[in-house]
Amino acid sequence: MNPAQLQLRDIHLPAAVSWWPPAPGWWLLVVTLMLFIAMLWWWRHHYQCRYYRRIALQQLAELEQRFLQEPQNVALVAELSKLLRHMAVLHFPASNCAGLQGEEWLEFLDRPFSDSPFSNGIGHVLAQGPYQRHNLMDQSEDLIALCRRWINQLPPVKPRRTP
């Protein structure tokens, strides 16, 4: 037999493996990574939007500790009123809440609640509290709890950056 007469072909190597399309494992890795990044962004955004609320709750806890150490009703009412007004200006347009006084201020504070705890409950002392002497010794915890409840109802807002 003559090898030249045989119709044999030389050994051919298969084509090189292409990098595209990737294997299913790579697709799964990319999707998982994208989901992780999205969740991380959402968590960061969620955390930042509640920054003022966390600060307000810390300040409220400090006020409560100070009041428990030195019970001063007028100072407590003034500080609580100041804290709530500051949080209102940070979370709502200033034109809606900055100039409110008396009953209008209490009605603004009552908006998130159906039972009107500021106008008809213990919260009414915030309107006249700094100007009158009240005996809040037995109701101070209720007033602080009401303020904490109002702060927890605040809508999330992105912190403002200072230049």
Image (cartoon, rainbow, N blue to C red):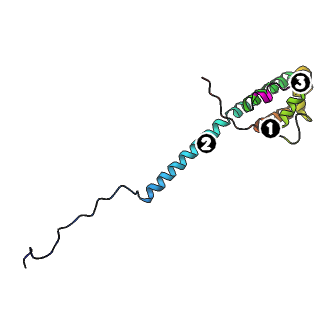
Q: Is residue 2 left or right of residue 91?
A: left
- Which amino acid type is marked by label 1? Arg
Residue 149 tag number = 1
Residue 51 tag number = none
Vertical relation: 21 (above or below) 79: below
Q: Quadrant of residue 119?
A: top right
Q: Is residue 54 left or right of residue 16?
A: right
Q: Residue, x 69% and y 32% (percent of image)?
A: 52
Magenta stretch in the rendered image: 94-101
Q: Quadrant of residue 54?
A: top right
The residue closer to the viewer here, 23 or 121, is 23
Vertical relation: 123 (above or below) 42: above
Q: Which residue is mark 2?
A: 43
Q: Mark 3 and mark 1: span between their CA atoms?
A: 19 Å
Q: Earlier in the sequence, mark 2 or mark 3?
A: 2
Q: Which residue is mark 3?
A: 129
Say whether residue 137 is visible: no
Quadrant of the snapshot with the C terminus: top right
The residue closer to the viewer here, 142 or 32, is 32
Say whether residue 104 is visible: yes
Q: Quadrant of residue 21?
A: bottom left
Q: Residue, x 69% and y 35% (percent of image)?
A: 157
Q: Mark 2 and mark 1: span between their CA atoms?
A: 23 Å
- Which amino acid type is marked by label 2? Trp
* Tag 2 secondary structure: helix
Local packing at callout 1 (Cα closer than 10 Å; few below 14, some 14-19, many 20+) is some
Q: Residue, x 48% and y 56% (percent of image)?
A: 28
Q: Earlier in the sequence, mark 3 or mark 1?
A: 3
The residue closer to the viewer here, 125 or 100, is 100
